[in-house]
Image (cartoon, grey):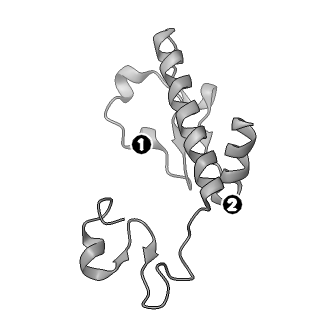
Amino acid sequence: LYSMDPSFKENQESEFLNIKLSKRNPLSQNAKTASRIEFEIMSKYIKKAAVNADKAIKSGNISIKPYCSSGIKPCDYCPFGEICMFDAKLDGYRTETKPENAYEYMKKEVD
């Protein structure tokens, strides 16, 4: 924890990691943590996603697929719009997976 967020040592609370240490328990009851099994599934999913991205890029797939989150369109602030050629009307934006559904999605993808 300390190596991921140096300010955590000083405050015993991390805004970045969304956790807080308490005196009685190593982590407060409100900490959003994953079990060992959940963490293993998330790790497998990340590895699979990285391998798939690597294969796609090496095979020549460099398609543009930006995310649109909470109505914020990345094209509004992206400096590469003139050369990118992404057209939201034709291609559409990807939408994010809701956090409450993310674990189930990852579990399904690695099974």
Residue identifier under label 2? 100
Q: What residue is at 41 percent from the left and 23 percent from the top?
A: 84
Measure the C-alpha gap from mark 1 to mark 2.
28 Å
The tag on residue 76 is 1
Which x, y percent locates residue 36?
A: 60, 57
Compared across the picture, whether 60 is left or right of 6 comes to right
105 is higher (above) or lower (below) than 62 = below
Q: Which amino acid type is shown beneath numbered disc 2?
A: Glu
Element type where label 1 sits in the image: helix
Horizontal relation, residue 101 to residue 27: left or right: right
| Frontmost residue, 57 versus 28 | 28
Image location of residue 92, percent across then percent down: 62, 33
Give the x, y percent position of residue 29: 57, 82
Going from N to C along the chain, the mark reached first, 1 or 2, is: 1
Residue type for callout 1? Asp
Q: Quadrant of the C terminus?
A: top right
**Quadrant where the N terminus is found in the figure:** bottom left
The reply to whether residue 95 is visible in this rendering is: yes
Residue name at image x 50 percent, y 30 percent: 50
Depicted 68 relative to depicted 20: above or below: above
